[in-house]
Image (cartoon, rainbow, N blue to C red):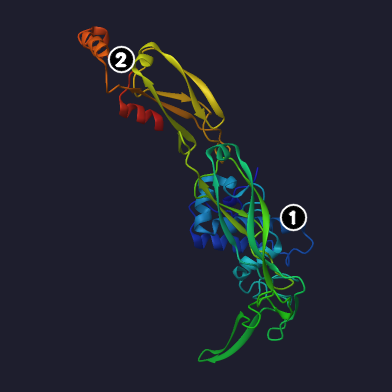
Amino acid sequence: MKEDYYDILGISKNATAAEIKKAYRKKAIEYHPDKNPGDDKAEEMFKKAAEAYEILGDENKRARYDQYGHQAFEGGGFGGGGMNMDDIFSQFGDIFGSAFGGGGGFGGFGGGFGGQRRTKGSNLRIRVKLTLDEIANGAEKKIKVKRKKQASGTKFKTCTTCNGSGQVTRVTNTILGRMQTASPCTTCGGSGQIIESKAADADAQGMKTEEETVSIKIPAGVVDGMQLKVTGKGNEAPGNNGIPGDLLVVIEEAEHETLSREGDNLHYDLYISVPEAILGTSKEIDTVGGKVRIKIEEGTQSGKILRLRSKGIPSINGYGRGDLLVHVNVWTPKNLNKEQREFFENMLDDERFSPQPQREDKSFFEKVKDMFS
């Protein structure tokens, strides 16, 4: 089982954004590869801290994590997991400040010690519509995505403006003395490389848009509006040292013909006739696992709720499965023939047709209360 992100950073669930950033910086400096050369355990802790900060440092991702846990970001390449050093220093290199020479990187990563800066391509966002059955059982979708890739024949060379660092340093004189500032190189856009030659059909950055089929594994229990991530399936970055962006998958839940969803529970409206309510019957209804037949006891009252346990949606956190709530509605006919009308007129004074609610015949508000408890 994956370790809790709050525990990794050593903070409480009520920590502020500033406290989260401070805790991550402390962990990152403690386990930084430059301070722990050749220490695989320290490198693993360094990656764990970065993964935790990627989620908790983002307000929207943190909210989803608090609600759904790790499964909100997992399944076939999704999520905050699987970060490598390129990802970490590309996204969070500035958080180290001057602790490691101001660049945040080491060796060939991040550009902190003369290595080329690693740039990341832009993310892509798509919407994937899922049926209720697919949400209940999980699904694998093959989606065609148009991504920018480096065109064949494109060659790059080191940027002469920044000498491949991706940054330019400026020194200005102020009343407080000489101040040194660093900013992304405008010549290469911070990549440290410029185009030497490119294919005729490539754009100004040496990129070409191509269509690719991406396989997406979607875990069971996702909810409408949830955003999942496929690492490395966004646009590629220009240059030889670029990191591809990510593919962000937004879940869209298709409306079911007879079932409606409320959290992990499902609701089904079942209509029966007056004779069926009086005599009892059996009915076939829809579930996410196929049709099932249920028994309606004789004397069933309109408004009765039948609970089919574990026939709902699996919890995305792995906490079991919701229920299917069948709402029984007795259909009252509007048009009767003469014989039918005479029958019911004769029953008006029959005590067996007079309402005699029992204690188990709860009111509508009591049923709603029970449904949500």
List the single residue furthest toward the front. Answer: 338
Up-down relation of residue 78 to residue 36 (above or below): above
Mark 1 vs mark 2: which is more N-terminal?
1
Question: Residue 349 bears which disc, if any?
Answer: none
Q: Position of residue 359 (x, y in %)?
A: 31, 16
Up-down relation of residue 151 to residue 282 (above or below): below
Q: Position of residue 123 (x, y in %)?
A: 60, 63
Up-down relation of residue 91 to residue 171 (above or below): above
Q: Residue at x 72, y 80 (%)?
A: 195
Q: Position of residue 279 (x, y in %)?
A: 38, 11
Quadrant containing the N terminus is top right
Quadrant containing the C terminus is top left
Q: Is residue 137 left or right of residue 347?
A: right
Q: Amino acid at mark 2?
A: Gln
List the single residue furthest toward the right. Answer: 38
Q: Amino acid at mark 1?
A: Lys
Residue position marked by numbered label 2 in the rendering? 358
Toward the viewer: 117 or 283?
283
Q: Secondary structure at mark 2?
A: loop
Q: Is residue 65 left or right of residue 164?
A: left
Nearer the observer: mark 1 or 2; the answer is 2
Q: Residue at x 68, y 83 (%)?
A: 162
| Residue 363 found in image quarter | top left
Q: Is residue 121 visible?
A: yes
Residue position marked by numbered label 1 in the rendering? 41
